Amino acid sequence: MSSSIFDLMQPEIETAAEGCSELRFKVRPEFTIPGGVLQGGMIAVMLDMAMAAAGHGYISTASLHCEILRPVEAKVVIVTGRITRKGRRIVFAEAEMRNVEGQVLARGTQTAVPLR
């Protein structure tokens, strides 16, 4: 039985245009540490997924950098991804996580390899 990270995370895709994306995630209890704060690795996954969606899933992460700006206690987060530069052999992307009030919670950047 096979399952993808997409199946696990269950994002709602608000936008998935060429070069940009907006995903909405429900912060489920199994994604949190004691105290109800979103676990850092889950934040990285959500940022990475938004950047991958901006690349229409045709990029593979080579390096990923995340900055968690404040504890994520929201029940829903909105993550936008954007391709900042795309070449034949390397792609650069960035992402930002916000709560529904618009407060920035985390940011990420990645270097990726195109799969096409």
Image: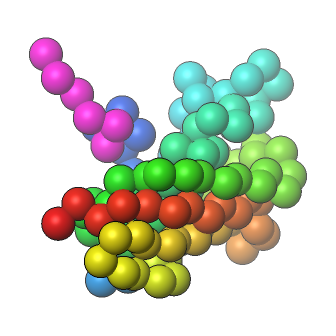
Between residue 31 and residue 20, name the one nearer to us: 20
At which x and y percent is residue 83?
46, 78
Between residue 65 and residue 26, name the one nearer to us: 65
- The image quadrant of residue 106 is bottom right
At which x and y percent is residue 50?
46, 62
Quarter of the image where the N terminus is located = top left
Q: Is residue 95 toward the left or the right of residue 61 in the image?
A: right
Q: Is residue 19 above or below residue 13?
A: below
The reply to whether the magenta stretch includes residue 5 is yes
Q: How is the image coloured?
A: rainbow
- The rendered magenta stretch, by its main secondary structure, is classed as loop
Q: Is residue 86 above or below residue 75?
A: below
Question: Is residue 46 something one can see in this rendering?
Answer: no
In percent of the image, x 77 and y 55: which residue is there? 67
In percent of the image, x 63 and y 45: which residue is there? 43
At which x and y percent is residue 56?
27, 68
Quarter of the image where the C terminus is located = bottom left
Magenta range: 1-6
Q: Is residue 99 toward the left or the right of residue 3 in the image?
A: right
Q: Is residue 35 above or below residue 66?
A: above
